[in-house]
Image (spheres, rainbow, N blue to C red):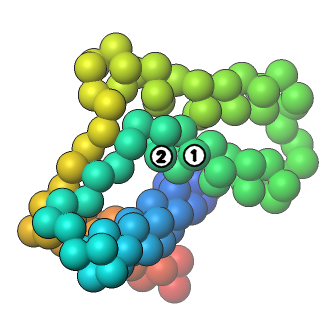
Amino acid sequence: MDHLYIKYIHRFSVLVLGTLIIAGIVAFIIQDHKTLTIHKEFFSYACGIPLIAMRSDNKNWKRRYYILLLFLCFYLPPKIFTLLGVQRLSFSFISYIIVLSFFSFIVWLFYFVKK
């Protein structure tokens, strides 16, 4: 797998993990909700922000390629969720822990393989 793809997957996982931790603290501890609700717009930012960070690292990308990827990352995830009829995802505390464990494993695996 290309180094840029691995870097993108790692940054995506770190961003999603950090956002889910903050959202979980707010929803489960501060607001005392039983579920955590994530709206479809979250996925466009989670896909696009690591791409912007990678663009600053790699100046060899052509502008057309970069604009196309930004379109795919920011526009398509909400459209796909709309076509599937999904407006938001709700996680109970147990499913939230499972999702956090998955992304933590990906981040841990990156650091383990990097060394």
Disc 2 designates what residue?
Answer: 42
Position in image of residue 111 (x %, y %): 48, 80
Q: Is residue 108 above or below residue 4?
A: below
Compared with 102, 90 (above or below) is above
Q: Is residue 87 left or right of residue 63?
A: left
Answer yes or no: do the residues labelled 2 and 1 have beta carbons within 8 Å?
Answer: yes
Q: Position of residue 18 (x, y in %)?
A: 47, 72
The residue carrying mark 1 is: 45
Q: Where is residue 32 drawn, in percent x and y?
A: 22, 75
Residue at position x 29%, y 52% in the image: 37
Q: Nearer the viewer, residue 109 or 95?
A: 95
Kind of residue indicated by mark 2: Phe
Q: Residue at x 78, y 32 (%)?
A: 66
The residue positioned 18% from the left and 60% from the top of the image is: 35
Tell me the quarter of the picture where residue 25 sits.
bottom left
> CA–CA distance between discs 2 and 1?
5 Å
Element under disc 1: helix
Residue 112 marker? none
